[in-house]
Amino acid sequence: MKYLVMVLGSEADYAAMTGRGSEASPAWNREQLQGMYDHMNAINEELAASGEMLDAQGLAAPSTTRFVTVEGDGRPVVTDGPYAETKEVLAGYWLLDCASLDRVTEIAARVARCPQPPGAPEYPVVVRPVDETGPSQD
């Protein structure tokens, strides 16, 4: 079964990873950042070797987000993001094909153990099954 495994973050976390810490997220140093990359790369290598990884991407900072809605007449309305009230955003994901929910939960737990600076915010790792049922063929 396919699962989307998502990691969360905030604009403050992206700034902290470039050394610009704040009350919301302490600054990362080079060693801490390298530790995070090493941890994630080890997971990626394992998942690629096992054939479970279909895709994985880290996403750019929330400040580069664009929200697109439509007006009543169908014209697009574009707003740069993130919205000020947005606390957490999707920071990256894996699309995995795993044998069971237990297996993907095991992977998510490894992701959650990613090293980070003391005092950094902790976010849950979100696991969502991909709905592969498709439209009804009646």
Image: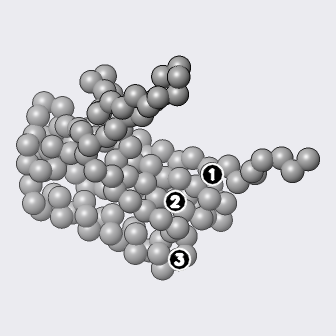
Label 3: which secondary element: helix
- The residue located at (67%, 49%) in the rendering is 131
Residue that carries the numbered disc 1 in the rendered image: 130
Which residue reaches farthest right?
A: 138
First-in-chain label (3 vs 1)? 3
In which quadrant of the rendered view does residue 57 lie? bottom left
Mark 1 residue element: loop
Q: How crowded is mark 3: few (under 14 residues within 10 Å), some or many (20 or more)?
A: few
Asked if 63 appears above or below 57 in the picture, the reply is above
Q: Which of 134 and 114 is in front in this view?
A: 134
Q: Position of residue 9 (x, y in %)?
A: 31, 41
**Spot occupied by residue 130 in the image (x, y as percentages of width and height):** 63, 51
Left or right, residue 30 beside residue 37: left
User: What residue lies at 33% left-to-right and 63% top-to-bottom?
Assistant: 40
Work out how far the residue at label 1 is from the one at label 2, CA to CA, in angstroms. Answer: 9 Å
Say which residue label 2 marks: 95
Q: Name the residue under label 3.
A: 50
Compared with 124, 104 (above or below) is below
Direction from residue 115 to residue 8 in the image, left or right: right
Disc 1 to disc 2: CB gap under 8 Å: yes
Determine the residue positioned at 35% across, 71% down.
Answer: 42
Q: Distance between the residues labelled 3 and 1?
A: 19 Å
Q: Nearer the viewer, mark 2 or mark 3?
A: 2
